[in-house]
Amino acid sequence: MKMIIALVVLVAVAAAAPVEEVVVVKSQENNNIGVDGYQYSYELSNGQNVQESGELRNVPGEDSPVIVVRGSFSYSDPITGKQYTVTYVADENGFQPSGEHIPA
């Protein structure tokens, strides 16, 4: 009887153990020659996407050029499965994200 209870407990613990998701890189691009700017992007098998580019810009009132970054990233909510996308700009005015789920 003890053997059956131990077996049932073992099966219950194994069934309750979290299953780790294997995430694979579906595509990736990188263009960074180290002069004036860069671009990169990647897509993962779990629905995550990232795209970003940056360039140097001369801004009036600044002593040296500033880097201006534009990009977006997408991800899926692990509970609902809903896809969210955030688009952003980061420049001399700071980080400015936008997305339908971000309050204006």
Image (cartoon, rainbow, N blue to C red):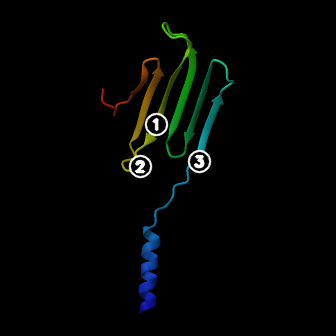
Residue located at (47% from left, 72% from top): 14
Question: What is the C-alpha distance between the residues marked 1 and 2?
Answer: 13 Å
Q: Which residue is mark 2?
A: 78
Q: Residues within 10 Å of mark 3 (few under 14, many from 20)?
A: few
Side of 102 relative to 46 (left or right): left
Q: Amino acid at mark 1?
A: Ser
Is the C terminus in the top left, top right, bottom left or bottom right quadrant?
Answer: top left
Side of 53 relative to 4 (left or right): right
Label 3 or label 2, whichever comes before in sequence order = 3
- Helix, strand or loop for disc 1: strand
Q: Residue furthest right?
A: 33
Label 1 or label 3, whichever comes before in sequence order = 3
Side of 62 relative to 33 (left or right): left
- Helix, strand or loop for disc 3: loop
Question: What is the C-alpha distance between the residues marked 3 and 2?
Answer: 16 Å
Q: Which residue is mark 1?
A: 74
Q: Amino acid at mark 3?
A: Val
Q: Residue furthest front?
A: 63
Q: Which residue is mark 3?
A: 24
Q: Amino acid at mark 2?
A: Pro
